[in-house]
Amino acid sequence: MARFALQFPAEDVCELAARFSYGKPDEDCLAAGAAARARGSYTRDELILICAWKTERSKSRVATNTETEAEFATARAFRAADEGHRIEALTSLAGVGVPTASALLFFAFPNDYPILDVRALESLGQKARTIYPASYWIDYLLACRRISKELGVPIRTLDKALWQASKERDPTR
């Protein structure tokens, strides 16, 4: 089990989150996520939109998913009874790894999920990986939920603070 621990003072979380600036607008992705949540699945176009928001590199691979594949896999993820099945359903889609799957979960359920990112990992004392197994995602998710609960902040506030702390330590990454 990976050990996740804040690499900055806990009292800095809200201040860091307030300074958060990713540089990509997320209004369209939040709207797509809300529509997907209400419908029970993402459409192919919504899948492409959110995956491109997370990383442009996989956009052409993500676009190879059919409408049926996108709707089926995301509906299966939304209905899954546990986090392992949820992430596995999403990563069954072409071009969707765990970090991108985390963005799909975040935009559909913004109060429940952080976004897995190398910057956030660094702020929790972890190094980036090339592959993220489902078990690592679950450890990360549970750690973020625990920390946000301990600090009394929404998970998105913690998520923004983690990213921003890393950016301020190394703006060139």
Image (cartoon, rainbow, N blue to C red):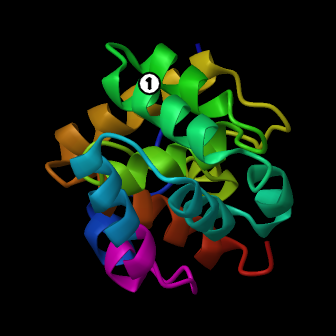
Where is 116 relative to 3, above or below?
Answer: below
Q: Quadrant of the N terminus?
A: top right
Asked if residue 52 is among those painted magenta in the image, a careful observer would answer no
Who's the residue at 49% across and 15% down the image? Answer: 85
Q: Position of residue 24 (x, y in %)?
A: 56, 83
67 and 135: which one is in front?
67
Rendering quarter of residue 69: top right
150 and 119: which one is in front?
119
Res. 4 visible in picture: no
- Report which residue position mark 1 lands on: 76
Who's the residue at 29% across and 59% down the image? Answer: 35
Where is 48 relative to 168, above or below?
Answer: above
Q: Mark 1 Cα within 10 Å, few/some/many (few <14, many 20+)?
A: some
Q: Position of residue 155 (x, y in %)?
A: 29, 50
Q: Quadrant of the C terminus?
A: bottom right
Give the SS element for disc 1: helix
> Would residue 162 be found to the left or right of residue 167 on screen?
left
Asked if residue 20 is among those painted magenta in the image, a careful observer would answer yes
Q: Position of residue 99 (x, y in %)?
A: 64, 45
| Bounds of the magenta segment | 17-29
Who's the residue at 39% across and 65% down the image? Answer: 32
Q: How many marks?
A: 1
Q: Name the residue type under label 1.
A: Arg
139 and 66: which one is in front?
66
84 and 7: which one is in front?
84
Q: Position of residue 33 (x, y in %)?
A: 36, 58
Res. 5 visible in picture: yes
Who's the residue at 58% across and 67% down the image? Answer: 49
